Image: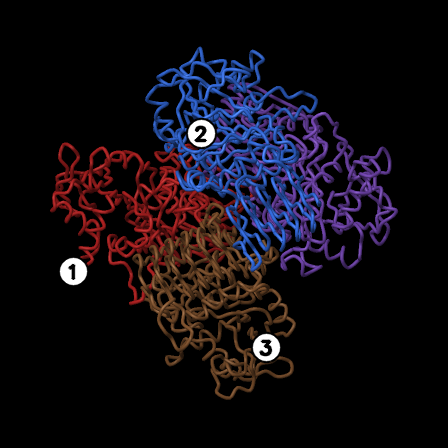
Chain colours: A blue, B purple, C brown, D red
Amino acid sequence: MTPEDKKGGRQMSNVMGIINNALDETFLEKLTNHRSLASVPFGARYRLIDFPLSNMVNSGIKNVGLLLESKYRSLMDHIGPGKAWDLDRKRNGMFILPPAHIYQANRAYKGDLQNFASNIDYIKRSSQEYVIITSPNIVCNIDYRSAFQFHLENENDITIIYKELPVFRRDTTYTVLNTDDQDRVIDMRVNPAKNYYKKISLQRYIMKKELLLKIIDDCVSMGQWDFLKNGIIGNIDKLKVYGYPFKSYASVINSITGYYKSNLELLKPEVWQDLFLKHGSIFTKPKDEAPTEYKESSFARNILAANGCIIEGEVRNSILFRGVKVHPGAHIKNSIIMQKSEIGPNVYLENVILDKGVIITGDKELRGDTNYPLIIEKNSIV
Amino acid sequence: MTPEDKKGGRQMSNVMGIINNALDETFLEKLTNHRSLASVPFGARYRLIDFPLSNMVNSGIKNVGLLLESKYRSLMDHIGPGKAWDLDRKRNGMFILPPAHIYQANRAYKGDLQNFASNIDYIKRSSQEYVIITSPNIVCNIDYRSAFQFHLENENDITIIYKELPVFRRDTTYTVLNTDDQDRVIDMRVNPAKNYYKKISLQRYIMKKELLLKIIDDCVSMGQWDFLKNGIIGNIDKLKVYGYPFKSYASVINSITGYYKSNLELLKPEVWQDLFLKHGSIFTKPKDEAPTEYKESSFARNILAANGCIIEGEVRNSILFRGVKVHPGAHIKNSIIMQKSEIGPNVYLENVILDKGVIITGDKELRGDTNYPLIIEKNSIV
Amino acid sequence: MPEVEMLGMLLAGGKGSRLGVLTKNIAKPAVPFGAEYRLIDFPLSNCSNSGIDTVGVLTQYKPLVLNSYIGNGSSWDLDRRRGGVTVLPPYVKEGGGAWYKGTADAIYQNIEFIDLYNPEYVLVLSGDHIYKMDYSEMLDYHKNKNAEASIAVIEVPWEDTNRFGIMNTDDEHRIYEFQEKPDNAKNNLASMGIYIFNWQSLRKYLIADAAKADSDGDFGKNIIPEMIDDDLEIYAYTFKNYWKDVGTIESYWRAHMDLLGDNPELNIHDRNWIIYSVNPNRPPHYIAETAEVDHSLINKGSQIFGKVDNCVISYGARIGKNAVIENCVILPNARIGVGSHIKNAIICENVTIERNCEIGINGESDEFKVTVIGDNEVIKKGANIEIGKVVG
Amino acid sequence: MPEVEMLGMLLAGGKGSRLGVLTKNIAKPAVPFGAEYRLIDFPLSNCSNSGIDTVGVLTQYKPLVLNSYIGNGSSWDLDRRRGGVTVLPPYVKEGGGAWYKGTADAIYQNIEFIDLYNPEYVLVLSGDHIYKMDYSEMLDYHKNKNAEASIAVIEVPWEDTNRFGIMNTDDEHRIYEFQEKPDNAKNNLASMGIYIFNWQSLRKYLIADAAKADSDGDFGKNIIPEMIDDDLEIYAYTFKNYWKDVGTIESYWRAHMDLLGDNPELNIHDRNWIIYSVNPNRPPHYIAETAEVDHSLINKGSQIFGKVDNCVISYGARIGKNAVIENCVILPNARIGVGSHIKNAIICENVTIERNCEIGINGESDEFKVTVIGDNEVIKKGANIEIGKVVG
């Protein structure tokens, strides 16, 4: 324990971060066939993990553990030693926490608390007294400092950051909660059939590290393996659990359409502003791409584009990741085109998601629906 | 492909390295319960992986892939981004290659070629034309440059680096080979019941990358999964396979006694010299330990000690890793004491291996045999 | 670790006076280029891509900005355990200190640094040209020729020879004569200011030259002629690709326009020869519904609401609605207000152009002239900046 | 990223003349210490451990060695994306340059650098003391006192007060008077040369002081007295742990002997306050069958075949068979030949003592004297170096 950490209750350096990547990710279908949810590309140049990780770093957290479950090679490539987040440190820094249960290949996976339990040494060894537990499937730009101050001043056992939706959308799944007038959490449900509260959990939980250790121990010793359902919801009657409202842009990625629409939402300048320019930058692995080139024949309206693209065709209402090539005569509309994909001459794309490295050869036409975008798998040639 | 790599056949920058950690490691028993073979501590401040990795870097290899199988958390902690080996690079550098088959938890593990196969993209993508494949269970300090020149000049398909033993030891297992007068490999066997050739393979193979890709493809497509038995031995009749003799110190770690004796062998000044001062340093993760302190009451003879130890007792013919504490009146003989272990007052240890963080409380006596050292598991309190 | 075969010494102290306001606050090598880069990124990336991993960067004018830009060299993959990039400002030694007299004097003053690595060869570079070059191929040439020194040269139009140092060579490319800006050139091979020397040989010449009070301490004027006089083996290495000196406002602007051709000679998209830079972390750029973008290079973090034609737009720039910019170079974080109209201009860092300005549109000029708005300037709404004017 | 609250400025330009041969080739902060460290490791590690991650290191005398020692600061975990360590040699500005007049002038000359980070507080440190201190606690004190400046002080024996700058304080620890080396001190609180200033306030004093031609540009002589005259709130922060100035050969040697006590006041083994250093990669050390080691600190890479009693042995040293060394400080890579006998000595880097030498054994001396063999010296076999002699 260096003095930097031990001194004080109230500074963010006394908080460790855990990003829980041991979540079910099958809802993203083809996008998570070969990668974890955390490394799903988002917003023209990011991956989902960049948001919770940058939020932590920007809030002054210096020790972050990444709980992993499976398919994490692409995540490790992306994160590396944490340099982009200034987390490649001798003290504290970033810790990659692979699951221990793969050691026993024949044992079935029970739930994410298994991952917490198998990395309990890291949690114990960390010098911070508090912990923020987050997950990668929520995109927002949040400064945890005020929530942490609320946690301390209100002497909560657990603080859950939530957002109140203007309307409840039924095309995706949420963890909802209900609070009393003082924001104490009185009910909380995962993807309920009824009880549609408009307050949705942003899956950011603040608590004492000691409490987390106790929750892990209690649950595991009783054969409970779900952090959210057993560890949090199972405790709202027993502990002082409060909600903390978050009022800026936040988007929950819990379905393909949710993913698709959240990406396209970034085209609204106020969302762009909220997500990228408030509370510090979103950091990501730099790729040293040249600026994007718009050629003579290009036509671009309402797009977000990363660097390294060469655009000779028409692109509207779309998100272009790094190094995308759009050939002359191609038309792209309401689509998400991932890294290094290439759209041949006179192709027509509408409401599609092209994963990385897809090649669409000349004159093809692909069309999905706004509520059912067409996904083309990584490295496909169409 | 940067010009740095593509230019030339004959430079080491045209060679990539692969360290095959997907080996059976159960022979090290308790030492590999919680770590992979590659991260087994060796020689007072190293781990086994340090030797092949440093050898590659010292030979001018700039791109190294680490094939992993299981229990690699401690290995990842140790290696980090490869900074200690100057391999934390934007181009080339070090690549951690976890197995893909854990993605399908129910599939049985077939053999190390599965790991090669699941990382074939990395191998293909690398810009180098040649590859050296090594394994972590052999400790030596070897400069690959001359072997590579031999490989090129003799136009070998495969070059196997071997060592001729003065006598064949039967207390461990070897991969042996027999060569003709020109050093062409004419027979090769893994741990044979007869055919005790004195030439033992050091499990360093040089070949064209294209050949490696072909071997992987051929074997996998025929349902063969063992790189050494199927990929190499299966090819000695078909390909031009030559041996290249290595004449300095080399030690094969294939048993507990082999491990124990190899450690104690470092106490011979000529071995120390050979391993640590020839052909560049052996790099390891630095730990920022203070120098070792020998107190008034200490007595030390014929020992190798890392930094950070505090010695108040008697130590003879032993290897002390970082941060070991030896209390007054303790006697240690012919033993290996790993990191942060603590030997209480008046303890007597002979022929023992203490894993990391073991505490031996006062007045205890532990005694193994030279041919059967007593192993005390990590973090035990005795 | 392998020893240092060839050490790079990058001369990055130039004030670049002819660039005017562009170098008011920063040294020439720190001038932004191509929306994403600074001039020094080109030689540094070339070093990195050529496998030259030990580089001294000699600064002088405004060293702090360059120092913090270069940092530990990790942006160019030059943060090595041994070697890597070292920034070398002209420091005050015990007996005092002075700025470098010339290019050779700059190397002479840093002999101690070079000796730390004791390289076989020293590569001398300057920090203010735009080009992609594999220095290791030049070294191969140098070795094959068994040369004492090799000088990279490029063919220039015969009518321009009087602006360059011209190398006269024999059939074997050996240099027998050097003419500084000759009126009647015998040859059109101009020195690019890129030299490979055998270090031990150069070291002697540098020491001898430093002893001469009247020497300019310059490679072109002193060291090379001296070596030629001594009949050393000096060879010209001909470079045939894109190379541009951006020494004036106009050539700087033109080099940007060169990037916008349909097949620009300088390919900055080549993933096999990445031009690295210090990556400012910015969100993707945004092209609004109201925007119109043609024939332009646009970098991250910029927001385009207006019309952009034939422009290079750096990170963090914002082009307002109904603004029209043509043939412009927009440097980082510049803001162009709604309805402004700008043509043939360079808009420097953090400039704010308020709404409805006209810049480089009005006024007359006999010859073509670039209009420039210097760093941090604020142009009030409705202002009219005439063609060729330089503000700041 | 959080902004820089307190910036560290580490004065590391000292020649350390009183250390004689120890600083012939290197600045004082680069002098090896404690088998594994160099003096500058102490303040740099203190910064790192105190959470101060933006540090300027002001070099002057022999800057190259320090520059390459510090590198990108990663050894102290100070390689930050923003901030980290920056080495600042006194560079030659456009109008020329000169060495710093004094401690305050050194900070004055680097105002531009400090302004880059615009910190609230500036911590001024020197690079030549051995101590472990949490500067963040001093900052808390500074904030609690609402001070304009805080000065770390340590109690010295009353009889030594005439060797120090003494702070006279009131009951609240406010400093009302500063006496430089007073004959009749009113107090025994000596300045440790560690200051925290409010940057905007210090900035004004530095600029004002620089305008005075007759000022020494020194904190102790000029800035602090001026601030006291102006009745600013200046507080003394009392430090109670081990602190040693190693300004002379003898104090340097004694500080080493301090490390060898059974409970040394300075605990270098504390894993909660690691003293970092540039880790020379060396194998574990080897104690041979013929060796005898007592009461000593031994670092990696050394090989001990002889008798070592009460010594500090740096990395890469080799002590031959039958050699006897007592109360010695052996610096990196020194070799002691078979049968040599050395007592009360400092053997510097890369020294070779051949066989059967006697060093510091013979000769007479009224007072205690340390014998020193300077860097790279070779002492021929059988040589006799008398007590107190300094070779090199």
Left-right relation of B23 to C91: right
The residue marked by circle 3 belongs to what chain? C
Whether labels 1 and 2 belong to a single chain: the reply is no
**Vertical position of residue A215 compared to residue A88: above or below:** above
At a point 36% along the width and 47% down the height, the residue shown is D55
Viewer-side residue, B341 vs A151: A151
Q: Residue tagged by mark 2?
A: A16
The label shown at residue D214 is 1
Kind of residue sitting beneath label 1: Asp
What is the CA distance from the residue labelled 2 to the residue labelled 3?
61 Å
Kind of residue sitting beneath label 3: Tyr
Which of discs 1 and 3 lies nearer the camera? The answer is: 3
Left-right relation of B233 to B143: right
Q: Residue tagged by mark 3?
A: C235
The answer to whether one can see residue B281 in this image is: yes
Q: Secondary structure at mark 1?
A: loop
Extreme residue toward the bottom, this view: C184
Q: Residues within 10 Å of mark 3 (few under 14, many from 20)?
A: many
Instruction: Find residue B179 and report its horizontal and vertical position in percent.
Output: 84, 48
Classify the position of the C terminus of chain D by image quarter.
Answer: bottom left
Res. D283 image quadrant:
top right
Extreme residue toward the right, this view: B237
What is the CA distance from the residue labelled 1 to the residue labelled 2?
53 Å
Viewer-side residue, A277 vs C328: C328
Instruction: Find residue A112 and report its horizontal and vertical position in percent.
Output: 57, 22
Which of discs 1 and 2 lies nearer the camera? The answer is: 2
Whether labels 1 and 3 belong to a single chain: the reply is no
